[in-house]
Image (cartoon, rainbow, N blue to C red):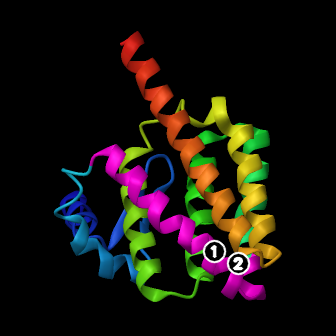
Amino acid sequence: MREALKALSLIGLIREERGKGTFVRERSEFLIRPLLFGLEEECKLQALIEVRQLIEVELAGLAAERGGEPEIKSIALWLDRMDNLAQLERSNEYLTADIEFHFAIALAAHNALLSRYGTLTRNLIHKWFPSQDSFYPPGLQQGLGEHHEIFEAIRGGRSVEARRDMKRHLVGSANRLLATIRSGEERG
């Protein structure tokens, strides 16, 4: 059974979350998983940061222009979950909600190709961030405020502001992550 689960995980049909269990991936993840085989081992954090800044800024703008009521509600639900988890100081679950917030924005952009790239970056984020448990508590409130600004711009249909707010958030979160990693290396 263990070997079967490993095989299903390797080909991307399931995902394992430490302490929670094993889950079937969404169908869109099945299709993007083969693209990860060449990237997982070689992807540098800086490359992931740069790709997110290029793609997610545009996704935020498109979401503000194209997002309908169901997509706005989905983004709001993930933001509410982030608020609740931040109050409970549950950083691992907060990280998952944070990633899903960004993915909901990608879906609201109504661009299938960009959303697939969003799936790819989401999977790569899962590879980098689970070991960064200490990252979110220090910058959690600042990051949460940035998410609220992004959401308000998208909900208001203000694409220029949505792009600007997303850029500011991604640069800020990258700086916080890199500072945390450097701090850990200095202690280690």
Residue 64: image tag: 2
Residue 186: name its quadrant: top left
Residue 148: image tag: none
The residue lying at 36 percent from left, 13 percent from top is 188
118, above or below 139, in the image: below
Amino acid type for the residue under numbered disc 1:
Gly
Q: Is residue 57 magenta?
A: yes
Q: In the visual, does 8 lie left or right of 117? A: left
Residue 183 position in % (x across, y down): 46, 19
Circle 1 sits on which residue? 61
Amino acid type for the residue under numbered disc 2:
Ala
Magenta stretch bounds: 44-73
Q: Are marks 1 and 2 in contact (CB under 8 Å)?
A: yes
Crowding at label 2, few (<14), some or many (≥20) Cα neighbours within 10 Å?
Answer: many
Q: Nearer the viewer, residue 165 or 135?
A: 165
Secondary structure of the residue carrying tag 2 is: helix
Residue 91 position in % (x across, y down): 61, 40
